[in-house]
Image (cartoon, rainbow, N blue to C red):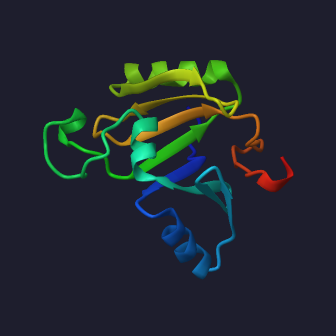
Amino acid sequence: MEQRVSLITLGVTDLDRARRFYEALGWRGQEVEETVFFQAGGLGLVLWGREKLARDSGREAGTAGGFGGFGGFGGFGGIVLAHNVRSRDEVDALLGQAERAGGRVTKPAAESPHGFYSGAFADPDGHPWEVAHNPGFPLAEDGALTLPEFDTL
């Protein structure tokens, strides 16, 4: 696995409020299908509904506190890290590598309705990671991700 984070997705309770907050900080967002994307250097910051994000990563959307879940902590903390790769085969290989290293696959890899291929795993402390091959989100040679201009797609 290359050492990089491609996207950080924040699960929010009010998408409009969250978008207004980041835009008041001077960030420029693009909204697509109830998801807001911000280019943040060589990665993307994404705002998405908390319940949807939890389901998409194979987690429960409850609170972050408590014990009893994978890695000793229950619930969903509201943040998912993503590692984008250059091929579907890399998605499958990385999920297998994470499992062999002591993580747990929380969502087997599958084709999405939006044309990308992804799966998810949790590290030993329960932090969720998405692994994705998304041809629409190009990766530079150094792994930096560039979000497309969604209104031109």
Can I make out residue 149 in this image? no
Q: Quadrant of the N terminus?
A: top right
The percent position of residue 96, horizontal first and vertical second, equals: 47, 18
Circle count: 0
Q: Relative to 39, is 70 above or below?
A: above
Which residue shows up at 35% across the image and 42% down it? 127
Relative side of 139 to 8, left or right:
right
Q: Relative to 18, is 49 above or below?
A: above
Q: Quadrant of residue 114?
A: top right
The percent position of residue 46, horizontal first and vertical second, equals: 57, 55
The percent position of residue 31, horizontal first and vertical second, equals: 66, 58
Q: Which one is in front, 92 or 37?
A: 37
Relative side of 71 to 96, left or right:
left
The percent position of residue 98, horizontal first and vertical second, equals: 43, 26
Can I make out residue 110 in this image? yes
Which residue shows up at 57% across the image and 45% down it? 4
Relative side of 74 to 1, left or right:
left
Which residue shows up at 42% across the image and 31% down it? 121
Q: Which one is in front, 107 or 101?
A: 107
